[in-house]
Image (cartoon, helix red, strand yellow):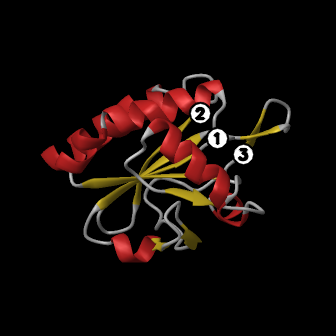
């Protein structure tokens, strides 16, 4: 897997709004990049809604939140509208970016893994959190790391 201290690999994917998201264009602000298994499943919904509920905190910390799964743009659009998500979800159909970030599979290789990367304003990975079962902990962990980065 990618390690803390390494540059975050650049990529370009489509957002729920049909726009193009390129990680490189986010330089100057932190990015919380979270990979999740599937739209509208219980754990993924809890995680997305927790990011939604604390989204302003992330904005206040100078960070953008971005979710990635292999679901289609249409699936992401429905998920976004249903749960009023204020941040972009990116469609990584085929899992190219998941592979680029070396996100491991979970549950005996059956499911795509749940991993969150905190990337600083210079594009360097500062934190990696990997947990399938503690979906909402990804939110509190990412926020804690961003607060620490601000104090450093």
| SS at circle 3 | loop
- Mark nearer the N terminus (1 vs 2): 1
- Mark nearer the N terminus (3 vs 2): 2
Which residue is painted at 47% across and 63% down in the image?
A: 6
Q: Do labels 1 and 2 touch, CB within 8 Å?
A: yes
Which residue is painted at 58% across and 56% down in the image?
A: 2
Q: CA distance from mark 3 to mark 2?
A: 17 Å
Give whichever of 59, 147 is nearer the camera.
59
Q: Which of labels 1 and 3 is toward the front?
A: 1
In the figure, is residue 86 to the left or right of 146?
Answer: right
| SS at circle 2 | helix
Residue, disc 1:
39
Q: Could one spot residue 46 in this view of the protein?
A: yes
Residue, disc 2:
44
Q: CA distance from mark 1 to mark 2?
A: 6 Å
Residue, disc 3:
104
Q: Position of residue 28 (x, y in %)?
A: 25, 70
In the figure, is residue 129 to the left or right of 53?
Answer: right
């Amino acid at each position: 897997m990618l390690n803390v201290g390494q540059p975050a690999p650049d990529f370009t994917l489509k957002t729920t709004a049909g726009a193009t998201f390129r990680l490189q264009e986010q330089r100057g602000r932190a990015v919380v990049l979270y990979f999740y298994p599937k739209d509208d499943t219980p754990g993924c919904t809890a995680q997305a809604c927790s990011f939604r509920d604390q989204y302003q905190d992330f904005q206040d910390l100078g960070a953008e939140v971005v979710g990635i799964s292999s679901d289609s743009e249409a699936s992401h659009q429905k998920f976004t509208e249903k749960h009023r998500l204020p941040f972009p979800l990116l469609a990584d159909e085929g899992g190219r970016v998941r592979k680029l970030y070396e996100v491991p599979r979970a549950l005996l290789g059956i499911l795509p893994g749940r991993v969150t990367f905190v990337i600083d304003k210079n594009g360097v990975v500062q934190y990696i959190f990997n947990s399938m079962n503690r979906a909402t902990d990804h939110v509190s962990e990412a926020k804690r790391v961003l607060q620490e980065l601000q104090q450093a």
